[in-house]
Image (cartoon, grey):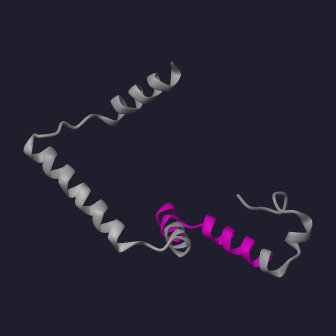
Amino acid sequence: MLNALSMPNQLWHNPHMTKMAEIIHEAESLPATERALVVDSLLQSLHAPNPAIDAQWAATAQRRLDELRSGNAKAILGNEVFAKVRKQFSS
C-alpha cells in the first residue's frame, strides 16, 4: 500500500505524486473485482495486447480443451501439480 511513510518526503509534496496517492487510495477502496479491472486496464496501457499472440493463445487453449474432451489428454488436479513442483524444488 502506498502511504506517506513509503514515499520520500520530496515526492510526497509533488502535486502529481499527491494525486497519484489519492488515486491509489481510492482504488484500494474498490471491491476486488473492480480493482482487478483497474489493474488490467493499467497493465494494458503499459503493454498493449497483441492480437496475433492472443489468437495463438486462444488456439492453444482450444486445442488443449479438445484433447481433454476427446480423452487424448488427462487432467491433473492442481494440488497434485503443486505438490510435484514443491517436491522438485525442495530436493
Q: Residue furthest right?
A: 10
Report whether 45 appears left or right of 23: left
Q: Nearer the viewer, residue 1 or 90?
A: 90
Quarter of image, res 12 = bottom right
Quarter of image, res 10 = bottom right
Residue at 35% from the left image edge and 66% from the top image edge? 53
Residue at 46% from the left image edge and 64% from the top image edge? 33
Residue at 22% from the left image edge and 38% from the top image edge? 75
Prevailing secondary structure class for the magenta stretch in the rendered image: helix
Quadrant occupied by the N terminus: bottom right
Q: Position of residue 20 (x, y in %)?
A: 72, 74
- The mark tally for this picture is 0
Q: Residue furthest left?
A: 70
Report whether 82 appears left or right of 73: right
Q: Does 14 lie within the magenta span?
A: no
What stretch of residues is rendered in magenta? Answer: 18-38
Q: Nearer the viewer, residue 50 or 34?
A: 50
Q: Position of residue 38 (x, y in %)?
A: 53, 70
Quarter of image, res 85 = top left
Q: Position of residue 35 (x, y in %)?
A: 53, 66
Q: Position of residue 86 (x, y in %)?
A: 47, 27
Report whether 7 appears left or right of 54: right
Residue at 20% from the left image edge and 57% from the top image edge? 62
